[in-house]
Image (cartoon, rainbow, N blue to C red):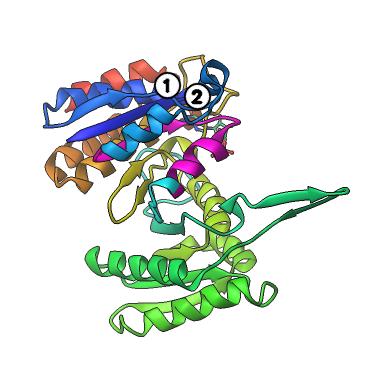
Amino acid sequence: MRIAVIPGDGIGKEVMNAAMILLENLNLPFKYEFYEAGDEALKKYGKALPDETLEACKKSDAVLFGAAGETAADVIVKLRQELDVFANVRPIKSIKGVDSLYKDLDVVIIRENTECLYKGIEFEIDGVAQTLRVITKKASERIARFAFEFARKEKRKKVTSLHKANVMKKTCGLFRDVCREVAKDYPEISFNEYYIDAACLYLVMDPYRFDVIVTTNMFGDIVSDLAAGLIGGLGLAPSANIGERYAIFEPVHGAAFDIAGKGIANPTAMILTACMMLKHFGFRDEASRIEKAVEDTIASGLKTRDLGGNLKTFEFTREVVKRI
Ligand code: ATP
């Protein structure tokens, strides 16, 4: 299987190194091919997502992505649309030993990935700037069904739809109605919905009421950063973008320029992202072994700076390798 690896910008490179050490240790039938994209690619080639990279992604079985900086919209948002990876799966799971706001939290956010305000249709005329929010019945149905199928497969009990249909009556109204319709096909899974603002309050005050969340693109982007904060931060949050033909695996975090180049980024999110890729291709045991090694490392008090420890990225990775 061919994996297009794009480390990208900022800490993307640093955390990708860590994930690759673990992946290459496994000797699985993956062929890793490295490509460029992001702010540096823009400077070098005049294009943030060079044609060669895009073509390579289309010829690969999956893409493993680090982070893009200022060019994120032209790189990862574009790549998600080009490869039609419509479902962004973002697990928010507490890790033992992390001094987080909540323990034993296990929520999965399913974010629609191809439309909404991130469609990129923007214009400015005479000092009036506008962005078009595109919500279609087709994409809403596809993501709602994905969320319920995911809940069924993972034996989860509840799907919650987040929207703001009382204000955005057309766009969110359509999304709300489609989710309600799809829910009827899954009587064994309970279904409810909240307005996005109330949902943020509940996520902070009582996140245990959530199981699987399904929402539109920008709301999904925002609540997944918020939810990552509940379990200890962006250094711990992995994600997978799944479509019918393609899959892109990338951590929730971005290039984090504030800490880039210092070797202190937490590679856990990227490592757990690599584990999502392994599971996607059926290598569940290998993924579980790495996940357990990460948990054991953190539980024994060995942590990077974001979690209150003092290990550098490579020191943390070395500890994980030792535990496999
Ligand atoms: P984007 O919009 O590109 O997704 P973002 O707004 O989510 O980016 P990040 O670049 O991910 O922002 O960083 C947000 C904050 O989280 C920063 O303070 C950063 O240092 C911290 N952070 C993100 N990832 C990590 C990590 N792997 N290890 C430690 N800290 C991190």
Q: Is residue 33 above or below residue 271?
A: above
Q: Which residue is mark 2?
A: 9
If the image is split into quadrants, where does the C terminus sit? top left
Amino acid type of the residue that numbered disc 1 sits on in the rendered structure: Lys
Q: Secondary structure at mark 2?
A: loop
Bounds of the magenta span?
60-81
Residue 291 shown left or right of residue 36 in the figure: left
Is-magenta flag for residue 76?
Answer: yes
If the image is split into quadrants, where does the N terminus sit? top left
Q: Is residue 112 above or below residue 157?
A: above
Residue 193 drawn at (x, y percent):
51, 75
Q: Quadrant of residue 301?
A: top left
Is-magenta flag for residue 62?
Answer: yes
Using the numbered discs, state the Cα–Cα distance from disc 2 to disc 1 in whole angstroms. Answer: 6 Å
Q: Is residue 4 above or below residue 226?
A: above
Amino acid type of the residue that numbered disc 2 sits on in the rendered structure: Asp
Q: In the image, which disc is placed on residue 168?
A: none
| Quadrant where ligand 1 appears | top right
Q: Residue at x 34, y 16 (%)?
A: 315
Residue 127 drawn at (x, y percent):
87, 48
Q: Which residue is mark 1?
A: 13
Classify 10 Å Cα crowding around label 2: few (below 14), some (14-19), many (20 and above).
many
